[in-house]
Image (cartoon, helix red, strand yellow):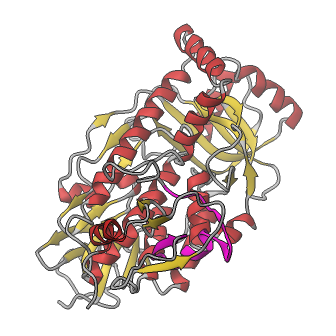
Amino acid sequence: MTDVNDVIVVGGGPTGLMLAGELRLHGVRVVVLERLTEPTEQSRGRGLHTRSVEMMDQRGLLDRFLAVSEKFQVGGLFGGIMKPWPDRLDTAHPYGLSTLQPVTERLLGERALELGAEIRRGCEVVGLSQDEHGVTVELADGGPPGHGGVAGGEGGARLRARYLVGCDGGRSVVRKRLGVGFPGEPATVETLLGDMEMTEDPETVAAVVAEVRKTQLRFGVIPNDDGKEGVFRVIVPADGVAEDGATAPTLEEFKQRLRACAGTDFGVHSPRWLSRFGDATRQAERYRVGRVLLAGDAAHIHPPTGGQGLNLGIQDAFNLGWKLAAAVAGWAPEGLLDSYHAERHPVGAAVLDNTRAQIALLGTDPGATALRELLSKLMDFEEVNRYVTEMITATGVRYDFGEGHELLGRRMRDVRLKQGRLYELMHGGRGLLLDRTGRLSVAGWADRVDHVVDLGEDLDVPAVLLRPDGHVAWAGDDQQDLLNRLLRWFGAPTV
């Protein structure tokens, strides 16, 4: 079987679509296999945090999101504690975007298609195998062979590529077929979530919700922001944990729980969709096994507290995309693809920990209430507020690149230059040497790294080398030191 595709991405959610776009920036032949035949209308993820906003700007997508989103700078980002954002965050985008997940998927999907990705719907992966040259996936009966597929045996069509990335959610078939461990804790509490209409007067609803939330922060009824008038997002604690978390709750279950928590069911009716989620917290032991990698919920699951799940997934994709493209192109230095796990696994583990802490804060017992009141007071201090905000928005992420300049390993904020803005220079997903000295060179790496000489006053170091994901790989003014970093991140120079 010929490897027509370079990469198969299993899963067409935000993570998979973001990854497909990143790969196509580098000419990688990529096909996305999505089990669902139509895009989902369910919107669990409802926004982009600051780091994700920066990523969209780095790829020239931000205007598309701004056109359909509202900015926010305040909210219960951590354990339901409502605080304004701190001043002077280290970003040119000190805000998040309220964007429904179906809208995010649509915009990322449109971008991937524009760049030449292939997206196949109704393709359910049921098996996979790999060898030293590539990966073969088996599709359920009815999965179209398409380009590069061949008729399989009883299991349906097969498809092959050089690499595969599982972005197929918390119940990932890819992860299970790989046999990768998924240690963590099962759900101990569960929450019902859905969009529906109601007959109760909105002012009465708001008053009741305000009273209930004095003691129960896992409760809420808010107008949905998808443009459908009269539709509300309802969130209410479940009565225990369902045996099968994949089974949707019924409208009657919602009514019973609303009456138990609020004394009224608000006359809810005509549900658009109903779902449930728990506080299960798990992380894949490995993000890479040979030619197969994991990203997004396939690599980590956690409670949605702080709205980090969707963001964590697309940030995985942003880290992985250029590295996998380098492996496909043949210039990836030794260890580059393994650095995906080395960098993103600790970030995922940190998010799991902060969501564990938030679940504890959301409790209704006296201890949780006292802890929440204490943390609320601490967050009145600017330094604490900034630390928590940077943690949730992922602007505080720093990868371990070893000793060096204080910027090393951090993502570079957008800065003004004589010739525009830094992020405007990164739309192509290439490395970038931003040079104020005019004495440095990337000769031999010009096919992978852009060299921009600019005396912009916002840059307070002689020069910085940025990876395609915007993280600082080097800072200084020594050419030999720069060459060593180019070799580490961008492979051998061309002759």
Question: In front: 403, or 308?
Answer: 403
- Residue beneath the point at 81% across and 32% down: 205
Q: Would residue 474 appear left or right of 338 to someone viewing this image?
A: right
Q: Would residue 450 appear left or right of 286 to someone viewing this image?
A: right
Picture coordinates of residue 14 (x, y %)? 50, 63
Question: In front: 61, or 38?
Answer: 61
Vertical position of residue 373 compared to residue 356: above or below: above
Quarter of the image containing the N terminus? bottom left
Residue 21 lies within the magenta run: no
Asked which quadrant contains residue 233, the reply is top right
Quarter of the image containing the C terminus? bottom left
Q: Would residue 185 appear left or right of 220 to someone viewing this image?
A: left
Residue 432 lies within the magenta run: yes
Q: Would residue 164 appear left or right of 398 to someone viewing this image?
A: left
Question: In front: 409, or 370?
Answer: 409
- Residue beneath the point at 51% across and 26% down: 239
Vertical position of residue 188 compared to residue 110: above or below: above
Name the outermost residue toward the left: 132
Residue 13 seen anywhere in this rendered image of the structure:
no
Question: In front: 188, or 347?
Answer: 347
Asked which quadrant contains residue 263, the reply is top right
- Residue beneath the point at 39% across and 32% down: 187
Residue range corresponding to the magenta coloring: 411-436
Asked which quadrant contains residue 483, the reply is bottom left
Picture coordinates of residue 373 (x, y %)? 63, 15
Residue 376 seen anywhere in this rendered image of the structure:
yes
Picture coordinates of residue 261 (x, y %)? 65, 22
